Amino acid sequence: MRTLALLVLLLLPLLVPVSAHADELLRELSIDPGANLLIQLDAGNVDVTAHDGDRLRLEARARGIGASGVSFLVTQEPGQVVLRSISAPWLSWLHAGPRVHVRAWVPRGLRLAVETAGRIVTYENGVERAFPAR
């Protein structure tokens, strides 16, 4: 009986699905008025909300199968911030790849460009789009 209980305890982690996820990106930046934000994703969803402050806040997450193969990179140059997702080459064969979700809180008047194969982009509170999702 004791052996059976031990065996169940050892096998339990294999029976319970584990949510795989990449390192999450949480970044808050000062940004110049009238600057550009470019979000480039291989696939995924983007939610954008404008606010009256002067700080840019970015959250990016990958979840599900293959999420460990996704990383995020933020670069900042004068007048422009770029958020990119970088997918490992082995993800190309994975048809049901990870779910990528980006949330951005941007100062009102910021120019925004989003490039994603997922084509699901939401804008709230008067965000100006520089050009549409591809």
Image (cartoon, helix red, strand yellow):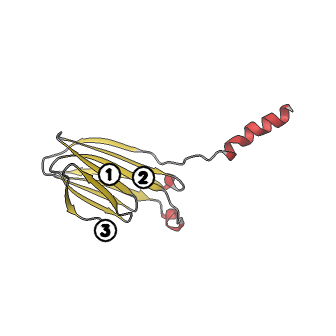
Image quadrant holding the C terminus, namely bottom left
Which amino acid, by three-letter code, is at mark 3? Arg
Which residue is outermost to the top?
A: 2
Q: Position of residue 56 (x, y in %)?
A: 24, 44
Which amino acid, by three-letter code, is at mark 1? Asp
User: Measured along the vertical axis of the image, is residue 88 above or below residue 56?
Assistant: below
Real-space CA distance between mark 2 and mark 1, rounded to the nearest whole angstrom: 19 Å
Q: Which residue is mark 2?
A: 71
Judge depth for marks 2 and 1 and give the one in front.
1
* Mark 2 neighbour density, 10 Å: few (under 14) some (14–19) many (20 or more): some
Mark 2, secondary structure of its residue: strand
**Residue drawn 52% across and 62% down?**
96
Give residue 94's mark. none
**Residue drawn 30% across and 55% down?**
122
Q: Which residue is mark 3?
A: 134
Real-space CA distance between mark 3 and mark 1, rounded to the nearest whole angstrom: 16 Å
Mark 2 or 1, nearer chain start: 1
* Mark 3 neighbour density, 10 Å: few (under 14) some (14–19) many (20 or more): few
Q: Which residue is mark 1?
A: 47
Mark 2 or 3, nearer chain start: 2
Real-space CA distance between mark 2 and mark 3, rounded to the nearest whole angstrom: 21 Å
Residue nearer the viewer, 120 or 74? 120
Mark 1, secondary structure of its residue: strand
Image quadrant holding the N terminus, namely top right
Residue 18 lies left or right of residue 91; in this view the side is right
Q: Position of residue 87 (x, y in %)?
A: 44, 59
